[in-house]
Image: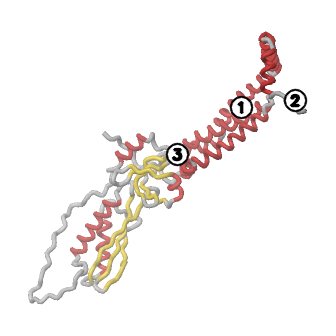
Amino acid sequence: MTPASTPPPATTDLATLAGIPLHERFAAALGQMQDKLLQLVANAPLLIVAVLIVLASLWLGRFASRRMRVITRIGRANPYMDGLLRNAVRVVIGLVGVLVALDLLGATPLVGAVLGSAGVVGLVLGFAFKDIAENYIAGVLLGLRKPFAPGDSVRIDSHEGKVVALSPRATILMTGEGNHLQLPNSLVFKSVLLNYSRNPKRRFDFEIPVGNHGSWHEAMDAGIAAVAAVDGVLDDPAPSALIDTLASDGATLRFLGWIDQRHNDLSRTRSEAMRGVRKALRAAGIAPPESVQKVVLQREEVVVPHYPEPGRTRDTSVDHALDAQVGHARSQEGGGGLLEATGTAQPPPAQLP
């Protein structure tokens, strides 16, 4: 004798529901709705208190973000960090209010589930957007440290140009050729950075070979006087000269001078100083060494002709060739981004026609 098999639960439920009249099922649903409404009315005071807690936390977040003196001091030096910190304070205080309100309503399991889901989602997004997060954090740190300002001439790793802006993801440069260069903030933060504009005084140097047919002492004095006579070369620090290398046919003299980058361009001043030193050495009868040794068999004295240098001087003022392009690029980027102009920056950028 085999035991009687019981029908599946789903079949039993369907049969039970099929045997219940429609008006009884409608009455049961109406009763459940009434119970939920009564429960909602009973919990109305707690719900009102929870809403008031959330609203109070939002107001407190806005009030605290406006009144915090630390944020105000930071904002004076960096407006971007001012907005970032104020938003962070508002969000944190608001989240605390929401969590307290949910706990008051007895939704602690919901809070745990939300926090757990947020942690998992944050972990996944962290791995997916690791490079973006790294560049963003590096941009914030660069905005705090401010190693450069818009218009500064910098060298980052092997890249050189003028700073246009610092965005949350990239540092934007304008190269000497007028190209628009974007460097990831993480690369800028980790690379060796050379800021040519931070100190207004900058030194230039160049080398000139001289032969043995003349006094090197006189050559150095004549060269120093020629460098000092160039427009834009500073008297303090004064120009100087030294013997850099020695050879059997002569020596290499190195001349040094300083300029103020706010008034003169380094390359132009250096070029004019080289021309002036060459002219002064020729006037003193000091010639460079012969690059090729030769034997001349002749009785007459040979006069080597040379072209005289004109007495006029060349321009040594600051080169503003890129200023208009940098200004146009800054306007397209919405200003300096995370950077603000400082006293070491260049004059206000001109707009391109």
Graded by Cα atoms within 10 Å as few (under 14), some (14 to 19) or many (20 or more), the crowding at tag 3 reads: many
Residue denoted by label 2: 4
Residue denoted by label 3: 168
Left or right of 27 on screen, residue 293: left
Left or right of 80 on screen, residue 253: left
Label 3 to label 2: alpha-carbon separation? 73 Å
Q: Position of residue 310 (x, y in %)?
A: 18, 64
Quick one: SS at disc 1? helix
Quadrant occupied by the N terminus: top right
**Which one is in front, 71 or 80?**
80
Mark 2 or mark 1, which has the lower sequence index?
A: 2
Left or right of 121 on screen, residue 181: left
The residue lying at 16 percent from left, 70 percent from top is 307
Residue denoted by label 1: 57
The kind of residue on which mark 1 rests is Ser
Label 3 to label 1: alpha-carbon separation? 29 Å
Quick one: SS at disc 3? loop
Q: Position of residue 62 (x, y in %)?
A: 65, 33
Mark 3 or mark 1, which has the lower sequence index?
A: 1
Residue 207's place in the image compared with 265, above or below, is: below
Graded by Cα atoms within 10 Å as few (under 14), some (14 to 19) or many (20 or more), the crowding at tag 1 reads: many
Of tags 2 and 1, the one toward the viewer is 2
The kind of residue on which mark 2 rests is Ala
Residue 148's place in the image compared with 20, above or below, is: below
